Amino acid sequence: MAALLLELPPPPFFNCNHHRFLSSSKTTLHYFPSKIPPPLTFTPTTTYCFLPTVTSSSIPEEEDKEEPHSIAVASTNAPDERPQQDRRKVVQIAWEKLVRWSRSWRSKNNKTDHLERTNKVVVLGGGSFGTAMAAHVAYRKSNLEVQILLRDPLLCQSINENHCNCKYFPEHKLPDNVIATTNAKAALLGADYCFHAVPVQFSSSFLEGIAEYVDPGLPFISLSKGLELNTLRMMSQIIPQALGNPYQPFVSLSGPSFALELMNKLPTAMVVASKDKKLAHATQQLLASSLLRISTSRDVTGVEIAGALKNVLAIAAGIVEGMNLGNNSMAALVAQGCTEIRWLATKMGAKPATITGLSGTGDIMLTCFVNLSRNRTVGVRLGSGEKLDDILSSMNQVAEGVSTAGAVIALAQKYNVKMPVLTAVARIIDNELTPKKAVLELMSLPQLNSSSLLVSTCHKDMVCDFRRQIIHHIIFVIYEIEEYVCLVLVTVTCDVKEVASFGR
């Protein structure tokens, strides 16, 4: 069988100056469809995530110090095995280069280990995720003091005596250096980091009660996702205002992560967002391990708003599942919900890349499609015909999407964004609409050329924003040209003076 010639760009992670091919710009590979190369195999080990945690999703090229490799490309008359060998060789070299870059990056950038300088960490709230994060940090350093601040004396006693959270993880043993207490002053005294795991709707009153014991420089790492119903505030606004310190260090931790899988020590990836770049890197070093990859971001608004609204979208996905509407409608609904979240987030000042990244789309996929999600479970039961009050009374954990849904309509009106899917969820929760009628209304919306259901006002606003950016760029270019012209004039003047002095 004749071979198919595929014109491919140079493989990623390669420097083609060091790896010589028959073509300098493109690589010609002969692929024989009659024999498909076997899939690559990967043997799991205890170290799952060997790659370093970096701030950017792109992986830079590093200088290859080894001898150049010569890769022969098979001709049309070569045996069938030769193209497979060449392909495997290319993949092997790419993998080895990635490993070398990873080791080099870690050796250069892990000079300061904040974990070694951390002696005490406090976790506010003993829920499922707060407990999982306390266990993760405690496993990172055996002599690290990890205290969980609770209100339930019985749960506190269970953690201290039996080393397990009998309410959320009765079958998981906590590390010995995890201690529970009901004394806020003792818990916060001398703490280097504070993990906030209290539900959003109760955070303001809780923080006001312990504000006198909080050090002004204590970094707060928020694990809570949601919006305060009455004020529409995010955690980055609630924590400083409740503590009475507008300069309280703040970090938001978000991403696709179930507490149960963290407790089971399964590979996970998350994002820490802070306007303080140094604090974000310090938090990254505190949490990152072979089981938990941490990326950093400065887009606090994008990370928080995506983490809040994905819970509302998960309820919508659960309703579709509970009504047995099929996979087509599920995909369409989640895609539309992602579009609505992206439009609102960008109107609030977030970066679109944040919404399509790990803390946005990644978290949305996990929450909408996996049964472990509390918010999705609420939606499934609503779609099956159960009452909301009965659902909430039977749950031992808080579904943040129920309360956050009430803030969606207010946010949509404030920023002039049409959000039909998320608004329908809010109306269902408020008993203004039945799930069946909501589906009929969504399907009867105008048929637009775009895949989005957003109205043209959003597009007009985006065009205005784009025009403003163009004007700013033009002004910047004008300033650059003026500086260049001035520099040329100064240079010419100096040259004329030098020539004149030389003539004398």
Image (tube, rainbow, N blue to C red):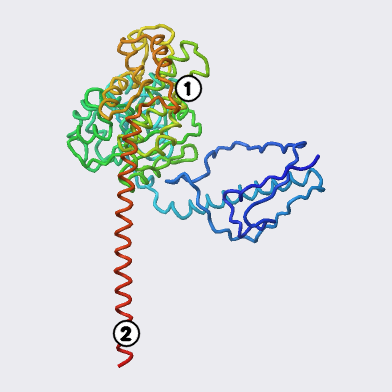
Residue at (77% x, 36% y) in the render: 34
Q: Nearer the viewer, mark 2 or mark 1?
A: 2
Looking at the figure, which quarter contains the N terminus? top right
Q: Which mark is residue 226?
A: none
Instruction: Rate crowding at label 1 as few (under 14), some (14 to 19) or many (20 or more) other CA atoms within 10 Å.
Output: few
Q: Earlier in the sequence, mark 2 or mark 1?
A: 1
Residue at numbered disc 1: 332
Against 8, is 161 above or below? above
Which SS class for mark 1? helix
SS class, disc 2? helix
From what the image shows, is residue 458 above or below residue 54? above
Q: Residue at x 27, y 35 (%)?
A: 236
Q: Position of residue 293 (x, y in %)?
A: 46, 39
Residue 336 locus on image (x, y percent):
43, 25
Question: Residue 33: horizontal and vertical position, in percent?
Answer: 74, 37
**Residue 288 falls in image quadrant:** top left
| Left or right of 249 in this view: 54 | right
Q: Amino acid at mark 2?
A: Glu
Q: What is the residue that sits farthest to the bottom in this orientation?
A: 504
Figure quadrant of the C terminus: bottom left
Position in image of residue 103 (x %, y %): 53, 51
Q: Residue 498 bears which disc, if any?
A: 2
Q: Position of 302 compared to 69: left or right?
A: left
Front residue (pair 404, 172): 404
